[in-house]
Image (cartoon, rainbow, N blue to C red):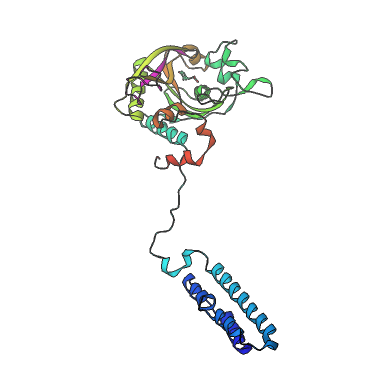
Amino acid sequence: MLQNIEKIRLDVSQFSADTKEEVEQFRIKYLGKKGILNELFRQFKAVPAGQKRETGQQINQLKLLINEKIESLLSTIGDEATDDASLDLSLPGPPLEPGARHPISIVRNEIIEIFGRLGYTISEGPEIEDDWHVFSSLNFPPEHPARDMQDTFFIEKDPDILLRTHTSSVQVRVMEKEQPPIRTISPGRVFRNEAISARAHCIFHQVEGLYIDENVSFADLKQTLLFFAHEMFGNGVEIRLRPSYFPFTEPSAEMDISCQICGGKGCNVCKYTGWLEILGCGMVDPNVLEFNHIDSTRYTGFAFGMGIERVAMLKYQVRDLRLYFENDIRFLEQFRSAY
Ligand code: DAH
């Protein structure tokens, strides 16, 4: 009997399997009801008393060995994927997800592309600016509330160095360097000392536009903005200009577009007016031209500034500004199909 056990031990240790099925058959063969081990226990009854102790130990050790063998076989076989029967090599692999552009970049690129077709160049300026470029040269009087600490981030307590609160500062940088005709847009980040909420953020993005030449009129401004609105939101959209005030334009206006969500009927997004504000604009104030050494008797111009988050909100119906900055992958991956 001991010889027989030794032979079985050898068989067990030499056994190998490629599939779970084979391991299961192995288990049944050795540990099943009518398996080899039970047969040994049956024979054990007939073993002479003197050999019972050693034979019993051998059978128990064999049982342990079989269990260990099964465990180690199953752990190397692992999951279904290595099971020949379920491995289909013709199946496509898991998709490689490409990155997506951020919605703000998508909308910024689209704005650049639309104005590019009208011949606008792109210009940039620094985010850390001085008072002259952000306020004074744009005709802000010295006591204007926009300079207030509540609205503007100043750098190191120096009232002259600050984070730009609008991209209008880039207009000035362009006028300093170039003489008309000037036709340029300036996309970029701006900073305001605001409490962060769904509707306000201390960092956001604007695109500034500036067009200066002889005989530029308010009608040119209106036509340019109508073209932009149609390209960005579709031909069905209507625009409305409301009189407003900015120190650097005269006359000044704010532009609304007809609400795309309710079609102008009134909803909670347009606060039941049918209209949504998307930008500020106006004819460049002659003072601003003169501050920048452009002859205001010869040249006129228009300017406008729009919030990219605002345009993106209307395009994608994203109602909470904070989503643009959190970089939650579940938000960002929804823009994968956009360009
Ligand atoms: N700078 C203004 C703002 O941040 C927007 C603006 C209004 C820009 C009128 C312009 C303009 O160029 O002409 O609210």
Report the magenta residues as a range: 249-273
Is 42 part of what is drawn in magenta?
no
> Could you tell me which residue is drawn at 55 percent across and 82 percent down?
39
- Residue at the far left in the pictured view: 236
Is residue 156 in sight in this rendering?
Answer: yes
Location of the C terminus by quadrant is: top left
Residue 324, compared with residue 155, is above or below; it is: below
Whole-percent x and y of residue 27?
A: 52, 74
Whole-percent x and y of residue 16?
A: 53, 77
| Along the viewing direction, whichever of 94 and 128 lies nearer the viewer | 94
Magenta-colored segment: predominant secondary structure: loop
| Along the viewing direction, whichever of 129 and 152 lies nearer the viewer | 152
> Could you tell me which residue is drawn at 56 percent across and 67 percent down?
75
Whole-percent x and y of residue 162?
A: 62, 23
Left or right placement of residue 50 versus residue 216 in this view: right
Tell me which corner region of the image, top left, top right, bottom left or bottom right, holds residue 317. Answer: top left
